[in-house]
Image: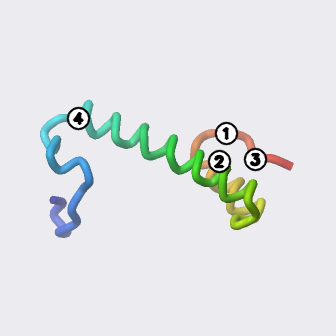
Amino acid sequence: MSKEGRVFPWRGHADDPAAKAQWDKDLAKWRLEDAERRFLFGTMDRYEYNVERRSAGLEPID
């Protein structure tokens, strides 16, 4: 739990920086895959999709 009282999903590995890093990597991958699915099915517009792509370090689509 953080100092602000927020419960982290990796709370079982609070003392394991490698587990937290793996969690962050998996979460970023999932967010990008989810954004791509939502964009392809029309529930997310191009701007929002490009925001997710930029946050993953990818170039925006035209």
Give the CA distance from mark 3 to mark 1: 6 Å
Farthest residue in the top direction?
18
Q: Position of residue 34 (x, y in %)?
A: 58, 52
Q: Residue at x 15, y 59 (%)?
A: 1
Of labels 3 and 4, earlier in sequence is 4
Asked whether the beta carbons under mark 3 and mark 4 sit within 8 Å of each other, the answer is no
Give the CA distance from mark 3 to mark 4: 31 Å
Give the CA distance from mark 3 to mark 2: 6 Å
Asked whether the beta carbons under mark 3 and mark 2 sit within 8 Å of each other, the answer is yes
Q: Is residue 40 left or right of residue 31?
A: right
Q: Position of residue 50 (x, y in %)?
A: 71, 53
* Residue type at tag 1: Leu
Mark number for residue 15?
Answer: none
The residue closer to the viewer here, 32 or 41, is 41
**Residue behind mark 3:** 60
> What SS does tag 1 mark?
loop
